Image (cartoon, rainbow, N blue to C red):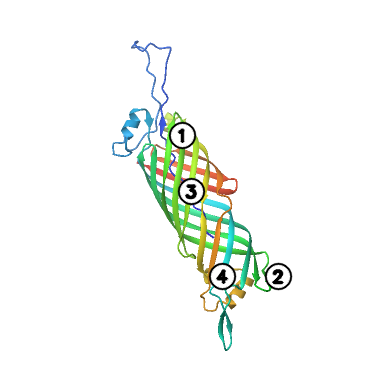
Amino acid sequence: MAPALTVQAAIPNMQKEAPSYDYHSDPLDPSAAPIPPKEKSPDLFGETTGPLPFFGKEARERGYDLPDPYGIGYTHMDIHQNIKVKSINFSNLKFPVPGIGSIPVDNMFNILVGHTREKSKTDTARLDTWLFPFMNVYGIVGHTRGRSVSNISACITGMGCLPGLKDIDFTLKFKGTTWGGGTTLAYGYHDWFGTMDFNYTETHFDVLDGNISAFTFTPRVGYRFTVPGVERFSIPVTHASLWVGTMYQDVDQDFKGNISDLHMPAGLSTLVNMVNRDDQGRFRVKQHLKSPWNILVGGQYELTRNFNITSEVGFSNRNSFMVGGEFRF
């Protein structure tokens, strides 16, 4: 059973500077001290002069502080979640009969599935750009590995569930390549910001036929802090962000593959091998996430304006941990 995949999009530092009013100074008095602008982190590449984001120049003239337009990032995500397995079926099985040949026994097994828990780890690389001041688009590629453990009872048609095949653990290990893309919509005012991330991914696993697709929607609301610099140690002014959010995943999976690729419990494996001597047996698993929603809490720290690190945890029905880094230019 395959994992539901998620990708952490870049958290923007797009914010609108709040206007400053000094009612104790006379604007016509040349001796009045000007109000200093809000400090920004130093940028290795200076002021952005490229074509992206579109309408970026107009946004900066209106007081918005936009991130550098291009980004390269790495993300590691660890997910533990419950899975609802609809069915596990075996097909193309044959029982050898001396002097007659083989008799099809596709309906020999009735697999009853109980609790299923899935653990997966995904590492992804991301390329992104701010197409507009409020819209980031990105593409990702990565690798997923993990396993799921299902509590099952294997029953034989006409005989019921055998004592040695009740309440046994059915483990499926998987690994494969993930690719996809998405977009993040963002808005910031003063130090508050909100984002909505949409992404679509496909994963091809080594024990499955075809690709498994997943759609993820993640809204977040957060606050961006200014972290003072330390001149004595040449540490510049930088920023940190904290946010809360929620994640929705739409993953409805239909897996197919060769029975010989499965790691079944010893008792069940012996029984299945009796009717799969030609290694042509097939399995099919239908499943979906038990709960599509969970809660997120995360943060980001800008080491410089061009490099930041991000971490996020998820809980309530699905447990997740994400950590990543990003370089912007």
Q: CA distance from mark 2 to mark 1?
A: 58 Å
Q: Nearer the viewer, residue 287 or 7?
A: 287
Q: Which mark is residue 79?
A: none
Determine which quarter of the picture holds residue 25: top left
Q: Secondary structure at mark 4?
A: strand
For label 4, count other residues whose C-alpha is less than 10 Å away and answer few (under 14), some (14-19) or many (20+): many
Q: Which mark is residue 90?
A: 4
Q: CA distance from mark 4 to mark 3?
A: 31 Å
Residue 210 pos. (x, y %): 45, 63
Q: Pointer 1 and pointer 3: residues touching (CB < 8 Å)?
A: no
Query: In the rendered structure, which disc, 3 or 2, sits on the residue that comes first in sequence?
Result: 2
What amino acid does circle 4 point to? Answer: Phe
User: As displayed, is residue 83 above or below residue 170?
Assistant: above
Q: Secondary structure at mark 2?
A: helix
View extreme (right): residue: 163
| Callout in the foreground (1, 4) | 4
Q: Which mark is residue 216?
A: 3
Q: Quadrant of the N terminus?
A: bottom right
Determine which quarter of the picture holds residue 308: top left
For label 1, count other residues whose C-alpha is less than 10 Å away and answer few (under 14), some (14-19) or many (20+): many
